[in-house]
């Protein structure tokens, strides 16, 4: 399975990709997570990316295409992947199509997670992530079993992403509208787009996603 999850910040791409990867045996490839790893490692890419991410803007297309080329070349992605947060611009989508053509494979589907912007703000304000395994929680809708800690493989601290403050979230939503929404039409014209309602419980959205990719 080669899938793209498309949707605004907070629409649930990462949450659903994490649930799907175990079920389908293919890795979640989150460009946000790859960038945050580079930031945590303090690499030159990470230091440059942090400034862009904290401002709610997009990292340059050529850098993102290089990151994706390297990630999709790893053996665990040979039989498929779930792309979460990539592509985000028309240039990235064109670059991805060229990379997949080089590999002799193609996307199976692009699923758009549709949701009201007011719900996004509430979701992002309450999001907490595990510092160790990256698992995503929400303090109200999806709290960790152990109160304020993730217990997946041991008790780990949770943190709030620095770009989840209200001002940066509003900028990320504006950037999504301007740079990423054109991809909806781009993939619709190619006959690859499936739309699902991303408002509902985690299980309800999960079921809609499975139905969309098997339709
Ligand atoms: P990235 O990490 O990709 O952020 P994003 O796209 O803004 O998406 P989010 O991770 O915020 O949201 P999500 O849709 O995954 O929602 P989640 O499942 O966590 O990118 C961060 C930054 O990196 C970008 O701003 C940019 O600077 C840079 N970047 C990344 N990729 C790039 C690229 N390709 N090009 C250029 N720059 C790039 O859910 C959110 C919350 O809601 C969670 O708390 C969750 O528990 C909760 N929740 C989820 N589903 C439900 C539900 N059904 N009901 C109730 N709560 C729910």
Image (cartoon, rainbow, N blue to C red):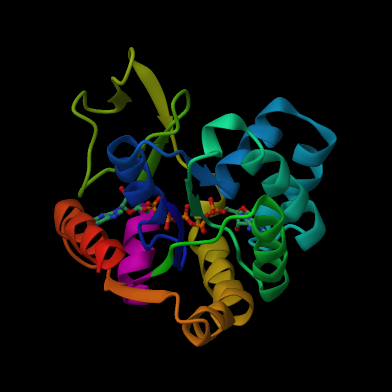
Residue furthest front as drawn: 104
Q: Position of residue 148 (x, y in %)?
A: 29, 28
Give the quarter of the image for residue 146.
top left
For the record, the magenta segment spans 112-125
Q: Quadrant of the C terminus?
A: bottom left
6 and 41: which is toward the camera: 6
Q: Is residue 158 above or below residue 27?
A: above
Q: Position of residue 102 (x, y in %)?
A: 72, 55
| Residue drawn at point x = 63 percent, y = 33 percent | 74
Q: Position of residue 72 (x, y in %)?
A: 63, 43
| Residue drawn at point x = 68 percent, y = 63 percent | 57
| Residue drawn at point x = 32 percent, y = 50 percent | 16
Q: Is residue 44 visible?
A: yes
Residue furthest top as drawn: 154
| Residue drawn at point x = 31 percent, y = 24 percent | 149
Q: Position of residue 173 (x, y in %)?
A: 52, 72
- Residue 145 as seen in the image, left or right of residue 174: left
Q: Is residue 180 magenta?
A: no
Q: Is residue 118 magenta?
A: yes
- Residue 156 as seen in the image, left or right of residue 107: left
């Amino acid at each position: 399975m080669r899938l793209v999850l498309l949707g605004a910040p907070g629409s649930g791409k990462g949450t659903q990709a994490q649930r799907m990867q175990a079920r389908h045996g293919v890795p979640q490839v989150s460009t946000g997570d790859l960038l945050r790893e580079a930031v945590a490692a303090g690499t030159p890419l990470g230091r440059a990316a942090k400034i862009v991410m904290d401002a709610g803007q997009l990292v340059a297309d050529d850098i993102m295409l290089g990151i994706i080329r390297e990630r999709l070349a790893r053996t665990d992605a040979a039989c498929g992947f779930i792309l979460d947060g990539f592509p985000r611009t028309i240039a990235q989508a064109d670059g991805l199509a060229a990379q997949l053509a080089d590999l002799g494979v193609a996307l199976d589907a692009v699923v758009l997670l549709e949701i009201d912007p007011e719900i996004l703000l509430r979701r992002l304000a309450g999001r907490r992530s595990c510092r160790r395994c990256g698992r995503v929680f929400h303090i109200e809708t999806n709290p960790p079993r152990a109160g304020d800690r993730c217990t997946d493989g041991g008790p780990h601290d949770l943190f709030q992403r620095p770009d989840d403050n209200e001002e940066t979230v509003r900028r990320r939503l504006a950037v999504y509208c301007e740079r990423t929404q054109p991809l909806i039409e781009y993939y619709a014209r190619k006959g690859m787009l499936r739309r699902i309602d991303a408002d509902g419980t985690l299980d309800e959205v999960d079921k809609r996603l499975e139905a969309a990719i098997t339709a």
